[in-house]
Image (spheres, coloured by chain):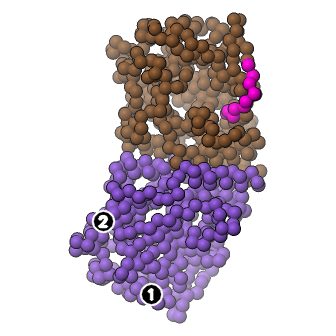
Chain colours: A brown, B purple
């Protein structure tokens, strides 16, 4: 298998030679044509301060989000909350893929738990099911329901607009999504660690047994299921430089501040950490636009994945097409 | 190597499942945004009759190209002409890659030879070196020097605008170019046989020894060189259905009529045959726009090529980057 290793090494080298080692920032919003050129490169970019005048972010709007504003706006709202002991919803844990305990809580109760930084439960509102318009109509006018230049470029409205409310205690493990993603930071900071689709061999995809946290009165238990799930097990914050493939990976870090919009291209691996603001909150809204499955990106990413997993001896999962339906890998 | 065969078969299947089995036609010219979406899919399309009102094509312009018009316009012009015995310039011949004898001829002499359909020399004006503005200033006002919606979409003027004058006797063998290509048919017809970059394993790339035709008083001799050149040896008009990979290839045929513009995406394999008009001519103008080397297409095509050639046991050529400089594979 020496030949395959060399071919994959060449691919990493080509990827690194042809693309920047950082995410470029630009201070102005793009035109639709400029944004589509960016999408065509499948490379991330930050539009700095592009959403700074949204009511949710603008301190002069009277509708700037804060603990107080959200508690008042959502006092009659029940929210779906992911609860874990370690802030590790949908994450590898040894040879398990652990999913959170999910509770429906009054918003005020969720906020109490979220802001109890010593509590034995880490809460994260991360439902990713187009929750913004469906569950939070009270907040819709504080943000945008699409990004106009992206909608024009991609010729469709977002497939989902998601509201995320969490704290420094939660981390989203490395994964990828089959969407063109625009991520708008509202409160606090998010730190993205990014890896390109070409570098699949480096992310250590493994078949992990699915498990779900169940909350008990005095902590959590793990219910281990029968199904397995392929998932990247690399932690970009704990690269082992003695490992052949890990030594070759290029991890690109991005820090998003309130008002920044990150274009996170389809199929890029990303780990996301959070930094709470003075209120203890980290809050963002993201826009998932359908990716183009007919162009080179989708077959490229799947082919690289198949070759990489074949070389690494990873068990093959059921069907590539299932990954699309699942909404992520 | 069973695993690799299965992975490459899956790739072909995915490519065929996700893309049409024909080249769509549209009757209207695209906006820049629409064209960029097409480029993003890396899939061909025909803009039917989009150039029908160019003076070179419009019968009422008084500048419509014809044998007579070209002879008059270019009576003082010397042209670089590819001469071969079989209409096979830059083509595989057994285990050779044969290049034409090249002559500089007065245009009228070239036309006499081109239109002598029984002559022992097949002529083709196919220099591909941005010859339109540099060698044929007399004809520049009869066509366009760029395609405005492509220039806007791709944010640059064409790298080269090439005039092609040939006849039914010449064929261009299967190859690919690292350019986004717009091909405008002016006189006669061109027939393209297209194969997607994902299907590299099917095109039978081989290392061929370079040879050059040398014209003698009574025919041609072949001067065999010392260098080799990788080239696809598949003839899409002679598919062997008993061959494993040839049986899987999808060849898409396109016939271009005067006024039609074909978008031929970067890195698609294409064989081109010609049909002369009543004057005995086949004439077109093509626009090579720089492709984006930073997006997924270039690493995808190179990776598929490396894996395919590794499986097929094709000798590795010097360096991927040389292919870019060469302008084709």
> Would residue A252 be found to the left or right of residue A65 on screen?
right
**Is B220 colored magenta in this rendering?**
no
Q: In the rendering, at what x and y percent does residue B145 appear?
A: 32, 62
- Can you identify the residue that label 2 sits on? B52
Q: Residue at x 49, y 59 (%)?
A: B22
> Would residue B212 be found to the left or right of residue A153 on screen?
right
Q: From the image, which quarter does the N terminus of chain B lie in?
A: bottom right
Disc 2: host chain: B
Residue B99 picture quarter: bottom right
Q: Residue at x 38, y 48 (%)?
A: B34
Near mark 2 (Cα within 10 A), the count class, few <14, some 14-19 or many ≥20, is: some
**Is A231 colored magenta in this rendering?**
yes
Q: In the rendering, at what x and y percent does residue A135 appear?
A: 47, 18
Q: From the image, which quarter does the C terminus of chain B lie in?
A: bottom right
Is residue B320 in sight in this rendering?
no
Q: Label 2, label 1: how many angstroms apart (C-alpha)? A: 28 Å
- Can you identify the residue that label 1 sits on? B117
**Viewer-nearest residue: A242 or B269:** B269
Q: Which residues are magenta?
A: A223-232
Considering every residue shown, the one lying at the far bottom of the view is: B218
Q: Residue at x 45, y 82 (%)?
A: B123
Q: Residue at x 69, y 68 (%)?
A: B242
Q: In the rendering, at what x and y percent does residue A299 appear?
A: 59, 48
Mark 2, secondary structure of its residue: loop
For marks 2 and 1, the one nearer the N-term is: 2
**Viewer-nearest residue: A286 or B155:** A286
């Amino acid at each position: 298998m020496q030949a395959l290793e060399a071919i994959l090494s060449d691919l990493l080298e080509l990827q690194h030679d042809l693309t920047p080692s950082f995410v470029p920032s630009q201070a102005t919003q793009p035109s639709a044509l400029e944004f589509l050129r960016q999408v065509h490169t499948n490379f991330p970019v930050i539009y700095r301060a592009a959403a700074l005048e949204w009511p949710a972010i603008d301190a002069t709007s009277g509708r700037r989000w804060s603990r107080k504003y959200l508690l008042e706006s959502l006092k009659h709202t029940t929210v779906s909350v992911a609860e874990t002991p370690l802030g590790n919803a949908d994450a590898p844990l040894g040879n398990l893929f652990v999913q959170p305990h999910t509770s429906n809580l009054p918003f005020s109760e969720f906020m109490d738990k979220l802001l109890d930084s010593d509590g034995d439960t880490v809460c994260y509102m991360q439902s990713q099911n187009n929750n913004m318009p469906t569950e939070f109509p009270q907040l819709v006018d504080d943000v945008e329901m699409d990004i106009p230049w992206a909608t024009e470029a991609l010729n469709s409205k977002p497939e989902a607009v998601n509201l995320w409310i969490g704290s420094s205690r939660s981390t989203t493990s490395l994964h990828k999504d089959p969407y063109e993603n625009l991520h708008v930071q509202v409160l606090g900071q998010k730190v993205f660690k990014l890896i390109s689709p070409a570098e699949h061999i480096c992310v250590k995809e493994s078949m992990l047994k699915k498990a779900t946290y169940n909350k008990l009165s005095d902590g959590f238990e793990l219910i281990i299921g029968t199904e397995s799930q392929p998932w990247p097990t690399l932690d970009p914050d704990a690269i082992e430089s003695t490992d052949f493939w890990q030594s070759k990976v290029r991890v690109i870090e991005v820090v998003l501040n309130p008002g920044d919009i990150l274009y996170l291209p389809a199929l890029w691996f990303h780990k996301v950490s959070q930094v709470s603001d003075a209120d203890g909150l980290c809050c963002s809204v993201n826009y998932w636009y359908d990716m183009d499955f007919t162009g080179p990106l989708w077959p490229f990413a799947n082919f690289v994945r198949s070759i990489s997993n074949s070389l690494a001896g990873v068990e093959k999962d059921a069907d590539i097409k299932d990954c699309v339906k699942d909404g992520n890998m």
